[in-house]
Amino acid sequence: MVNTRRLGGLGLAATFLLMTACSDSLTDSLTSAEEAELNLDVAAYAADATVDDIAMMVDEFARVLPAPLASGPFRGPGAGRLSDYEVSRTVTFYDEDDVEMIGYDPLLTSYIHMLFEMEGSRTRTGDRGTITQTVSRIRDMTISGMLGEEDARTWNGTGSSAKAAVMVSDANGERSYNFSATSIITDVVIPVPRGSGWPLSGTIERTINVEIIFGDEVRERTRVVLVEFNGTHLVTITINGETFTLDLETREVIRHSDET
């Protein structure tokens, strides 16, 4: 029996019956309304990942720097906005000659290499409904601009996310997905001291692979998501050419076509 879920107001059970009535094999098509609904759900998923990445750069990174902290691993509950997750990290400090240091020095450390993982689950409710998801993410990051007295640090690196089960429930019904992603973090500038402002500039680009679950059947889609930081809590997200605004403070996503 196919569960009735909705994308863009169209019941998935009805979609399944219509398709099988018209063809001997299930097609991979989605209506334009379903594709648009998918973009919004991908934006919500990317919003969570983006806010979590900022929490890694701010809340979690605050744990790295108390001098004199030695290089090495850590595992335990996340800090700040990552408190729902179990996190682990390994940090290595370098001086301006690229020589590995035994620990952090507030004046002599030039950059840090950090391997970071987070995993867990979260349910949150906002203006557009409820999203429940599992999380398993890895980040390989370099934090530069740290030599001497600092007013900002710059983050560059890559990331990946294992397949995550996501359930969205809102006015259009319930939708189930599996998401997996890769990410490129480029020149994201975080002001110093901690908490003195939002990321000043830089981008995060994600390639998100989506499995849309239709009962026992699956559709596959790929979305390329670009987040551009500007020093405020309202940042632009572009998904396959469509523009949204993300509120970094609330994690809410606004579709520009919905604005009046």
Image: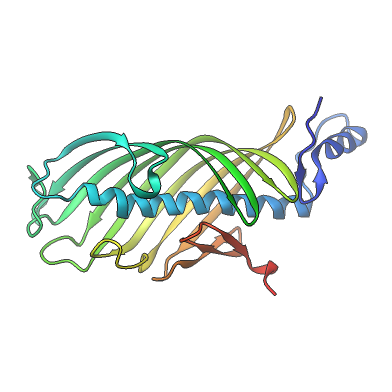
Q: Is residue 75 left or right of residue 224?
A: left
Which corner quadrant of the image does residue 14 belong to? Answer: top right
Viewer-closest of 109 and 253: 253
Q: Position of residue 122 (x, y in %)?
A: 50, 40
Q: Please tell me in which quadrant of the rendered image residue 86 appears.
A: top left
Left or right, residue 15 beside residue 183: right
Q: Which residue is drawn at 46% across and 44% down?
A: 182
Q: Is 131 drawn above or below residue 255 in the view shown?
A: above
**Residue nearest the viewer, comparing 250 with 207:** 250
Residue 133: percent from the left, percent from the top?
Answer: 55, 39
**Closer to the camera in the image, 32 or 229:** 229
Where is the N terminus found, in terms of image quarters?
top right
Count of numbered circles on the image = 0
Task: Please determine whether, in this image, residue 255 is positioned above or below residue 185.
Answer: below
Q: Give the farthest residue toward the right.
A: 21
Which residue is depicted at the point 47% across and 49% down? Answer: 49
In the depicted view, which residue is nearer to us: 225 or 175? Answer: 175
Looking at the image, the residue that sits furthest to the top is 1
- Colour scheme employed for the rendering of this structure: rainbow
User: Picture quarter containing residue 165?
Assistant: top right
- In the displayed structure, would residue 190 be above or below residue 121? below
Image coords of residue 56 (percent x, y): 34, 49
For the question of whether residue 164 can be seen, the reply is yes
Residue 10, position as x, y percentages in the image = 82, 47
Q: Which residue occupies 69% across, 67% down?
A: 258
Q: Is residue 157 visible?
A: no
Q: Quadrant of the C terminus?
A: bottom right
Residue at image location 92% in from the left, 36% down from the top: 22
Classify residue 122 as left or right of residue 211. Answer: left
